[in-house]
Amino acid sequence: MDQFNISMRKFLKEVGVTSQQAIEDAVREHNLAGKGKLKVKMLLTSETADLNHVVEGEIELP
């Protein structure tokens, strides 16, 4: 179980870091600063586990 937790945390860290970079790039490229909120949606899927999980939210723009 320890290896499972380590592997999952490593994956989630990569998702978090790369997602933050993608959001920052999109805000910069589309000149969205000061334009309220950015609606976002994250989709997590796994064919092996028949997983389909969606998280939606809003991010305050600088």
Image (cartoon, rainbow, N blue to C red):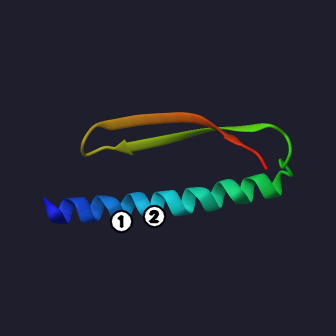
The amino acid on which the numbered mark 1 sits, given as a three-letter code, is Lys
**Residue 49 lies in quadrant:** top left
Residues at marks 1 and 2 touching, judged by CB atoms closer than 8 Å: yes
Q: Is residue 59 shown left or right of residue 18? A: right
Name the residue carrying label 1.
Answer: 10
View extreme (left): residue: 1
38 vs 9: above or below? above
> In the rendering, at what x and y percent does residue 13 appear?
43, 62
> What numbered label is drawn on residue 44?
none
Tag 1's secondary structure? Answer: helix
- Whether residue 22 sits left or right of residue 31 in the image: it is left
Instruction: Name the residue located 57 percent from the left edge and 56 percent from the top edge.
Output: 19
Quadrant that contains the N terminus: bottom left
Determine the residue positioned at 26% across, 65% down.
6
Vertical placement of residue 4 versus 40, above or below? below
How many numbered callouts? 2
Location of mark 2 (residue): 14
- Residue 22 in which image quadrant: bottom right
